Image (cartoon, coloured by chain):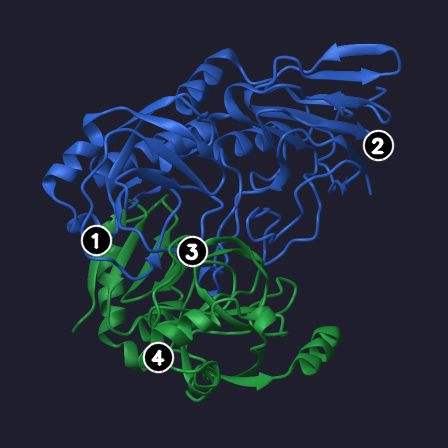
Amino acid sequence: MRRIRIVEPGLLSTVQDLGRFGHSASGVGPAGAGDPLSLRLGNRLLGNDENAAALEMTLRGASIAFEDDAVVCLAGANAPQAKLSHGATDRPLPMWTPTPVRAGSTLAVGPITGGSRAYLCLDGGIASEPVLGSRATHVPSAVGPSVLQTNTTLQLGEPVRGVLLAPLDASRRRDIEQVLTRRTLRITPGAQHDRFSTVSCEALVASEYTVSDHADRAGIRLSGPAIDTPDASMRSEAVLTGAIQITPDGRPLILFVDRPTTGGYPVLATVIYADLPAIGQVRARETIRFEWVTRDEARAASSALEKLTASVPRPRPTNRATRGPGS
Amino acid sequence: MPPTLSWSSERSIRIATDDPLACWRAIRASGLPGVLDITPGFGSVQVEFEVVGLDDARVEDELRALLDRTSEVGDTTEPRSHTLPVCYDAAFAPDLDRVAQFAGLSREQVIERHTAPSYRVEVIGFSPGFGYLSGLDEALHTPRLDSPRTRIPAGSVGIAGEHTGAYPQATAGGWNLIGRTPLRLFDARRDPPALLRLGDTVRFEPIDRSAFDRLTGER
């Protein structure tokens, strides 16, 4: 099996697919890519299954040694200094571009800008042993592959052979960037919405909030004007990725992919599915706003996102040899 | 009280019910299409759907029909009974004195009353395999700590409010710690991964330190 090795893991690099579902009654949360749109598209560009596992890198990317030939595609936020080295030659690795990499090469991803997460998708996907049906890493509970360390080696799956690879065109890149840089997050009423006053519901959309330094895969704490919360304490109930809890100090907390399955603070609103990839790209100290939408509007937004995803061409098998390493 | 449905996002429904376990079992057994996950909590169950192709009216109708006959369609999984060995040694029980003081009991009486009941796994949440056990002796109801510990050892047995339970992983936590079990409560490579399942019954059995060490070595 083909392998890659982590030379330097960067700030926080993990193996992620689209998440682990169906085990919440055992307390197992979904985990999965913080920006699932980028993961899906990076995989599509390589001819992979959209759910193939890739490397998720946060703020500062990893350095990776390729022990075998592979085709890679960087997706997500920008990695302007990403560089492939083989022997004495260096070349930049552009975003959203399937690129053959020869055995013996090293990829240094470097700083991630314009967002917080980039994905290194690899042809065939990362073939770690699935845990409860998924290769996603849930960082707080250590379910799934371990957080990547220096010298971790990862095996790659069987690639799709004989495909023509093309970079993502400029117009779709703009569309995707629009989705990922959206900072007015659309919301619909959450599980405990009816426990809040109209004033609280209006307050949530009335002001800007700043993403605090306590923002990670588990949750994004916001600072800004306090919101009145119901006095009565509640017993733990199921939560959702994108659920906005109001903590006792009145601040909103957006639960994210590494969230627990249940929570004890009331959920005022839930960020719509189509805006979850944008949450995966917010950075500490950025400002965000919320905007109430109807369920129908939320559905329309997710349909538009699915359409955009489906419009990204998958390479089709051809009779020609892979435009791959050494050819 | 009949279950009531409300949307908690464009992709999930919250079902308020006084029997989350039966509700969860019924939906799980139904094979309802498009369901991503079903999560029971206290007094409610959440059903999360694939957002693509979701039809509000159809899903609501199907869920209502299903919940009307919960008792017939509920799966027949028999609840299991567990006996969890717990070592109540001072080294594992930093809050045993606090619980005793709160209850106006001696440490020994707290242990007696903690090991007497047969508990029921009411909800699993917070972390993988963490069961909220109900049936705690009222005298032992103790508010959680004012500020949670940042890291407590796996296996720690605690009390918070009307619940007791054991931490499967080393995590942060605000429960009053009164002992530790040597059992592995969650193992993702085991099937099923969580030792406790919703609706199971649990008893605690006091063990001494040497038994704890021996059982820890065996697992």
Label 1 marks a residue whose chain is B
Q: Residues within 10 Å of mark 4 (few under 14, many from 20)?
A: few
Q: In the image, what residue occupies the spot 70% across and 74% down?
A: B216
- Residue A68 — which label? 2
Place of residue A281 in the rendered image (x, y in percent of width and height, measured from the top left): 47, 27
Name the amino acid type tagged 3. Thr
- Label 4: chain? B
Point out the residue furthest to the left here: A198
Q: Which tag, 2 or 3, sits closer to the chain's start? A: 2
Relative placement, left or right, of A286 versus B3 is right
Q: Amino acid at mark 1?
A: Ala
Q: Secondary structure at mark 2?
A: loop
Q: Is residue A325 above or below residue A221?
A: above
Q: Secondary structure at mark 1?
A: helix
Tell me what residue is drawn at x 56 percent, y 85 percent.
B206
Answer whether residue B192 is visible to the viewer in this image: no
Q: In the image, which disc is placed on residue B104?
A: 4
Q: Residue at x 61, y 84 (%)?
A: B207
Badge 4 and badge 3 both on one subunit: no
Quadrant in which the C terminus of chain A is drawn? top right
Mark 2 to mark 4 CA distance (whole Å): 68 Å
Spatial CA span between label 3 and label 1: 26 Å
Taking B82 as reference, is B171 above or below it? above
Q: Secondary structure at mark 3?
A: loop
Q: Tell me what hue chain A is rendered in.
A: blue
